């Protein structure tokens, strides 16, 4: 029986180790796998600050350990659905090449689902590359569904330059809102 421990990195003393390990895996393994040579633009301080010094934290991390080595991680954040309530989005689910096919992803997903169940989360969302057949097979066995096929939903994104342009009033429709329609930003 394979034993893969999943560590919840939730205390600051563990934070630097967690984010160092994650950043290494993201920079050198995940980026190479996805063909992004220069990898992420995050620093260890960015991860420590956003994950462990902010309240609420912007993300949480689960680290999988196998045979005394970091085998993979799941980097997640809380979300909220107007349809189902509490949700979690998985930004990264990564298992090192040398630890694949040993139950690490399954262990990470189980630990994540245990946490979600304990926190009454009703939905877990993530993206996967369409050519990642082993991951797609695992997700299908878990009961995951392709939102494009089931609901015709596309994943969209605004990158920082577009966010800033829209915030400054650019790239918005030139038609004024209907009479009486107002948008009041809420910053809690």
Image (cartoon, grey):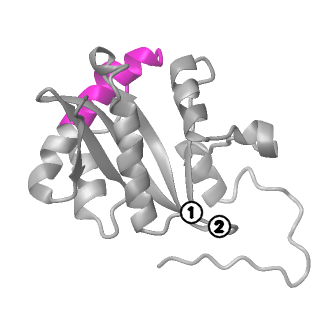
Residue 188, compared with residue 143, is above or below; it is below
- In the rendered structure, the answer to whether residue 78 lies left or right of residue 11 reads right
- Judge whether residue 40 can be spotted in this image: no
For the point 76% across and 38% down, the residue is 148
Q: Are marks 1 and 2 in contact (CB under 8 Å)?
A: yes
Q: Residues within 10 Å of mark 2 (few under 14, many from 20)?
A: few
Say which residue label 1 marks: 122
Q: How many marks?
A: 2
State which tag comes first along the sequence, 1 or 2: 2
Name the spot of residue 178 as percent of width and height, x first.
91, 75
- Judge whether residue 179 can be spotted in this image: yes
Q: Disc 1 to disc 2, how far (Cα)?
A: 6 Å
Q: Please, what secondary structure does the residue beneath circle 2 have? A: loop
Q: Is residue 86 magenta?
A: no
Q: Is residue 27 magenta?
A: yes
Name the spot of residue 125 as percent of width and height, x first.
56, 48
Residue 95, compared with residue 54, is above or below; it is above
Q: Name, please, the residue furthest toward the front.
A: 1
Residue range (magenta): 21-40
Which labelled disc corresponds to residue 84? 2
Q: Please, what secondary structure does the residue beneath circle 1 have? A: loop
Residue 71, compared with residue 73, is above or below; it is above
Task: Name which quarter of the figure residue 161 lies in.
Answer: top right
- In the rendered structure, the answer to whether residue 37 lies left or right of residue 120 reads left
167 or 109, which is in the foreground?
109
Task: Name which quarter of the figure residue 139 lies in.
Answer: top right
Name the spot of residue 68 as percent of width and height, x first.
11, 29
For the point 30% across and 55% down, the residue is 50
For the point 31% across and 37% down, the residue is 73
- Name the magenta segment's main secondary structure: helix
165 or 113, which is in the foreground?
113
């Amino acid at each position: 029986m394979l034993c893969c421990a999943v560590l919840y990195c939730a205390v600051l003393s563990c934070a630097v180790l967690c984010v160092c390990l994650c950043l290494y895996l993201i920079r050198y393994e995940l980026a190479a796998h996805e063909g992004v040579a220069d990898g992420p633009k995050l620093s260890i301080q960015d991860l420590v600050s956003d994950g462990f010094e902010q309240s609420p934290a912007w993300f949480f991390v689960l680290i999988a350990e196998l045979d005394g080595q970091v085998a993979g991680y799941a980097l997640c954040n809380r979300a909220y659905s107007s349809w189902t309530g509490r949700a979690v989005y998985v930004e990264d689910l990564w298992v090192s090449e040398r630890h694949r096919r040993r139950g690490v992803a399954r262990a990470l997903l189980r630990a994540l689902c245990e946490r979600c169940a304990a926190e009454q989360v009703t939905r877990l969302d993530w993206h996967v590359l369409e050519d990642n057949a082993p991951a797609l097979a695992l997700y299908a066995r878990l009961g995951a569904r392709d939102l494009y096929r089931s609901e015709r939903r596309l994943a969209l994104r605004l990158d920082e330059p577009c966010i800033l342009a829209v915030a400054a009033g650019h790239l918005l429709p030139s038609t004024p809102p209907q009479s009486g329609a107002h948008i009041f930003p809420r910053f809690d």
